[in-house]
Image: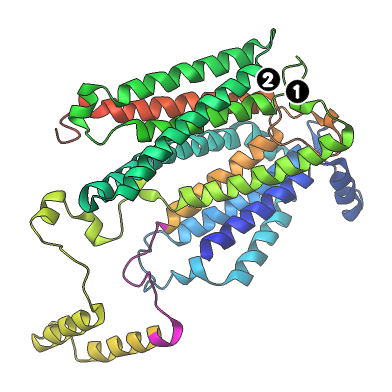
Amino acid sequence: MTRIAYALILLINSILSWIMYTPWAMNKLKHLTLNYMKISCDGKECHGFVAVHRINFALGIFHAILAILLLGVKSSRNGRAPIQNSYWAIKIVGWLALIVLTFLIPEGFFIVWGNYFALIGAVLFLLLGLILLVDLAHTWAEYCLEKIEFRNSRMWRSVLIGSTLGMYLGSIALTIVMYIFFAHSGCSMNQAAITINLIFLLIISFISVHPTVQDYNPRAGLAQSAMVAIYCTYLTMSAVSMEPDDKQCNPLLRATRGTRTASIVLGAIVTMLTIAYTTTRAATQGMALGAKPNNPYAQLSADEVEHGLVTQQPNNRREMRADALRAAVESGSLPESALEESDDDDSDDERTGRDDERSTTQYNYSLFHFIFLLATTWVATLLTMNVDMKEGDFVPVGRTYWASWVKIVSGWVCYVIYGWSLVAPVVLPDRFGH
């Protein structure tokens, strides 16, 4: 529930900053401030560029403060843990107050922030997302293989083969559609992007089943490659379908004004929802980014597991804890009051429900908020980079050549990251235990 709440705040903040880009919002803002506030950049009217960065900067500062306050929190027993999961009224008021305060900061600060610092944060956010996508591909395939190997499950074998085949067929189908509708004569950018994506798809598929790679990583295969392929092909499809139509290469934009407006509004909402969901998923997957797991069982080596040090989950953890506490009290390591505190904890659990973070948090709280901070820079950059206000009252989110190239290059980088994950054990065998 906590993660959904933070995602909802990001979604509302993103939609609000998008609305602030409209002339209507600018006029309303000037009216509310009795014409005291002039939205300009270097003395020239720039619509909502500064306003967009103010609102996203406010949410970024909000998450930066929470990240600092929650440093080192590893369980709900920590006195600072409620900051993450409680005090929502105070946090919402604080977020809104930060938005108001940012409008008191000179516009020159946000011109520098938007053109340099926010751009760097946006690039970092994209890179983290690509790393997590590659990690998800490996995790998914390994999970299916474990089910097949240890349970000899025909169902999971069918799921693995079916999903792999389906994602490859989807990638091929999208590629054909792009060649037919977006790669006409004169559309050299689209032709190059589609062709390079197809070449990368074939290369990583070949590498994943190469005998040398299989020797060093037997679990590498087409399942991971298929997920990376469908994602990168989707990025390319999204790029060519959202680019401007000044070269007559995007038939989706040739519609009536009403249809274009509806398309822009729907596209903006879908984009914001996607960003909110992706950010929440990324923020809770710290292990893929190198964060150490809080769960002590996760730190055991494979040899320790094989030798039976951890063979099964305890049947009654409460009884085991009580026995351990009694033994510690009898040996003099703990005072007798520890038994009373344990009873109080158990009764609290019975009254309020089970606390699944009493022993360890499910994710790194500070890293969670840091990734949300980066997400605010991506939203601001996506909304303000090379936007053409001639489309109408609403700004088309991501409908620029800059945004299209970001998606295209992101797909290429994703292929490179995944390819490196395949060849790294071959190139650096000592680093990976071979």
Q: Do the residues labelled 1 and 2 touch (CB within 8 Å)?
A: yes
**Is 37 covered by the magenta stretch?**
no
> Compared with residue 384, is residue 52 higher up or lower down, i.e. above or below?
below
Res. 251 mark: 1
Res. 181 mark: 2
**Is 354 covered by the magenta stretch?**
yes
Q: Nearer the viewer, residue 371 or 301?
A: 301
Q: Where is residue 350 in the image (x, y as percent from the top left)?
A: 39, 86
Q: In which quarter of the image is the C terminus?
A: top left
Identify the residue at the far top of this view: 185
Q: Give the range drawn in magenta.
A: 350-364
> Compared with residue 48, is residue 365 higher up or lower down, i.e. above or below?
below
Residue type at tag 1: Pro
Q: Where is residue 143 in the image (x, y as percent from the top left)?
A: 31, 48
Q: Nearer the viewer, residue 32 or 187?
A: 187
Residue that appears at 47% across and 71% down: 82
Q: Position of residue 251 (x, y in %)?
A: 75, 23
Which quadrant of the view contains residue 345? bottom left
Instruction: Label 2: state its secondary structure.
Output: helix
Res. 425 mark: none
Residue type at tag 2: Phe
Ranked by sequence position, the earlier of labels 1 and 2 is 2
Few, some or many residues within 10 Å of mark 2 (<14, 14–19, 20+): some
Instruction: Label 1: state its secondary structure.
Output: helix
Q: Nearer the viewer, residue 65 or 418?
A: 418
Residue that appears at 60% across and 13% down: 191
Q: Looking at the image, what colour scheme do you see?
A: rainbow
